Image (tube, grey):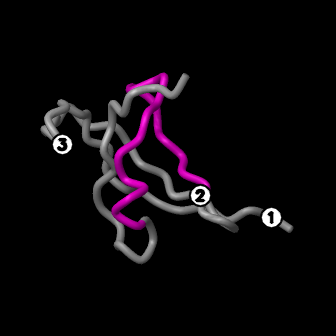
């Protein structure tokens, strides 16, 4: 069973994270969310802000930094 989205990722550049990947689910809304994007991770930090997306209230996570996977 798929989990219902509970966060939205904001910040960074659309080139870094396409719009269709920004509404997500995380089990822990109080920890940094790491999104794997091929050869890197985009890191998003939780905020206290919430917004409505498609009729659902989602917690906002803002882009913080990126790290690269070592080869």
Q: Which mark is residue 38?
A: none
Which quadrant: the C terminus?
bottom right
**Which element is circle 1 on?**
loop
The x, y position of residue 70, in whole percent, is: 80, 64
> In the displayed structure, does residue 41 sit left or right of residue 44?
right
In the rendered image, which residue does mark 3 sit on? Answer: 53
Does residue 20 show up magenta in the picture?
A: yes
Q: Quadrant of residue 39?
A: bottom right
**Mark 1 or mark 3, earlier in chain:** 3
**Labels 1 and 2 touching (C-beta < 8 A):** no
> Bounds of the magenta span?
18-36
Rendered residue at 38%/59% (across/down): 20
Of badges 2 and 3, the one in the foreground is 3
The crowd level at tag 3 (other Cα within 10 Å; few <14, some 14-19, many 20+) is few
The crowd level at tag 1 (other Cα within 10 Å; few <14, some 14-19, many 20+) is few
In the rendered image, which residue does mark 2 sit on? Answer: 41
Relative to 48, residue 67 above or below: below
**Labels 1 and 3 touching (C-beta < 8 A):** no
């Amino acid at each position: 069973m798929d989990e219902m989205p509970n966060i939205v990722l904001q910040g960074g550049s659309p080139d870094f994270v396409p719009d269709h990947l920004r509404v997500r689910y995380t089990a822990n809304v109080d920890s940094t969310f790491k999104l794997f994007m091929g050869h890197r991770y985009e890191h998003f930090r939780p905020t206290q802000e919430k917004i409505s997306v498609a009729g659902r209230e989602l917690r906002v996570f803002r882009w913080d930094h990126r790290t690269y996977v070592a080869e």
